[in-house]
Image (cartoon, rainbow, N blue to C red):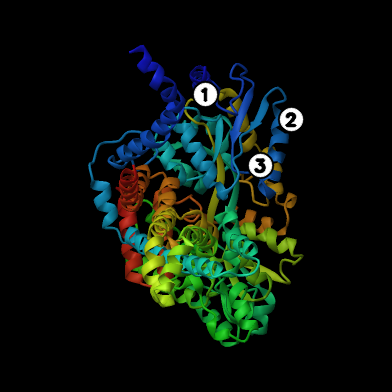
Amino acid sequence: MRKGVRNWGPPLLLVSPTILILGIFVYGLIAANIQVSTTNRHSLSPQSEFVGLENYLALLSEDRFLHSLFNLVVFTVVFIAGTMLFGFIWAWMLDKGVNAEGMFRSVFLFPMAISFVASGVVWRWLLNSAEGDRASGLNRIFETLGLGFLQNAWWNEPIWGMAAIAMPAIWQLSGYVMALFLAGFRGIPQELREAARMDGASEWKLYRFVVFPQLSPIALSALIIVSHMSLKVFDLIMSVTGSIYQTEVPATYMWVTLTSNDYAKSATIATILLLLASLFIIPYLIQTWRSEKADR
Amino acid sequence: MRKRRLSLIAGAALAGLALAGCSPAGGSTDDGNANQVEVFTWWASGSEKVGLDALVSVFDEQNPDVDFTNAAVAGGAGSNAKAALASRLEANNPPDTFQAHAGAELTDYIEAGQLQDLSSFYEENGLNEALPPTLIDQLTSDGKIYSVPSNIHRANVTWVNVEVLESAGIDPNVAPADMDAWIDDLTELKDSGVETPLSLGTEWTQMQLFENVLIADLGAEGYTGLWDGTTAWDGPGVATAVDHYDQLLDFVNTDYAGLDWDAATQLVLDGNAGYNVMGDWAEAAFVQAGQTYGTEYTTWATPGTEGVFDFLADSFTLPEGAPHEAAAIDWLTTVSSAEGQKAFNIAKGSIPARTDAIASDYPAYQQTALKSFGEDTVVSSLAHGAAAASSWSADLSSAIGRFGVDRDGDALIAATVSAASSALG
């Protein structure tokens, strides 16, 4: 018995601060948040009653919230497609062998070192929607290059404006996806490619049947990481446009309701965001768990 | 041996965690000393900081034995400070006094029982006589007053570029009589080749323009009635205002949603736009650019709002359970005194709430504002927290932002009706 304690006691003691902190500040607060979302605490005053799922039903039937979800979907789709596409192309080109590979790797990876807030301030100017004489940023570049017809309102576009906000995010994270894919390419043994070539596989078939299947776990991880970042997007939008209706996503809507003291509503939005994120994360965790078990 | 070292490290980690939990909250003051006052504001930079410093020096003069603690929280035009304040109030750890927009924005604190009634303070200090009666009306909630205004700003001011108007043959010194007349002038300006007759900025400036149109079309009484339910949001007055606002949006810069107020005002300053509706803090921008009132730029009350003063004010409160209540009352006394108001407002560029201020102490624009504040009907600004509780104005802000995208007047009216019904209960 005493031997047993000696065996598992110290490791448990060692992880207990982490367990305690995570327990209180992550899971405890998630529980508190869910509890608030089931009350009618719509003001500062602490008195509240249990109202069940009323807040959720009200929110999901609200035009404004649906608009913010739509914005989020547009942003997420463009952002994921953009980062995966550029990340893959860059990794593929680097893998083909270029001079000064290290330099290109750093150049592509560097934007990730900048915070969304800092790059948001720059992109706020680049994506300025003024056209003609008062144009600045990208519109000004188009104008001086004689490509004036390319000028557009960017995020000021009523329906697809969120796609413009995804541009800075793509610029920042494509390099990261590239690094993941590059590691994936490098992990494929040269022998496999040589064997395929010996068997007379064309370049396309080599990629289709040898390289891509080996890259799919990497692609999945990249997809999960990028998509959960997209669900949480807040800082980028706040620094490019501020919290306005046109570019509202659930995270900025949550901030607005919190600062106007509607605690129940902001807790409800937070819970919905958490559920959305877990839609992506949980299948990923299950998949990792399964593959780890298979390895053992 | 290795095991033991491991458990030692683990034990140390736990002990560190426990110690961290015991350390006192940062920034707390020595509670034993009654002669101190902790003042919570979001005045951390620029003219606001200068104004606060001026106010503090008057306070130190009047109360040499009371220590002043500045608990200013910077950033986000007060939103960071409000969030920090909410958590302090929630934890029953209020500052001795905190800054808040006067008027309806205090509703949340009042309903939560977090503020003390200052009616008797007003009587003792003769503030009921010193402040204009229409302002007292706007500050009173259920017969009680919860805050002491330190400074007043005006939100229904139209800033005019004299040269732009004159070259289009419009007399810049005569304000159009009403919204329709103004829209005629705007049309004339546009026809003469000015691309953006009226400049506009991000969501709250749109809300401020909309509130100006509401005042113009409903009159002072009708507009004030919107906030207590006596004027219907789906009535004909609001419909006219929405229609006028819709027409005004035809004259604005296309990139307005991305511009902050100062960038929008800059358009008038640079002669790229003829008009801009903005609060009187814009005065500082014109002065800094070296322009002269009356020759390069001029101002009038937004067309149709002549005789109405659309006010917003910063004010100080006395929280329930303030640790140093006597010192906090000293602070409020300084804030409301003629001397304190003069020092603060000259530095910040606003006007004092007291009617006994001497106009000649102030610069030219402030003199005109002082004059109208004394004579005009005072109404509360929506965009700046005086007219509606914060959740109500957040709803309206979003509805107005949406209107800028879809220009659907019926949807805007429906949204304002539902915002009013959820706010008024």
Q: Which residue lies furthest to the front in this view?
A: A198
How much space separates mark 2 and mark 1, taking CA atoms?
50 Å
Provide the residue designation for mark 1. B13
Same-subunit check for callouts 2 and 1: yes
How much space separates mark 1 and mark 3, taking CA atoms?
54 Å
Residue B375 visible: no
Specify whether B297 is left or right of B28: right
Specify whether B221 is left or right of B128: left
Label 1: few (<14), some (14–19) or many (≥20) C-alpha neighbours in 10 Å: some
Provide the residue designation for mark 2. B61
Specify whether A277 is left or right of B256: left
Indicate the quadrant containing the C terminus of chain A: top left, top right, bottom left or bottom right.
top left
Query: Which of pointers 2 and 1 lies earlier in the amino acid sequence?
Result: 1
For the residue pair B50 and B313, the one nearer the viewer reads as B50
Secondary structure beneath disc 3?
helix
Provide the residue designation for mark 3. B341
Determine whether B299 is above or below A27 in the image. Answer: below
Give the residue type that dot 1 points to: Ala
Determine whether B170 is above or below A241 in the image. Answer: below
Give the residue type that dot 2 points to: Glu
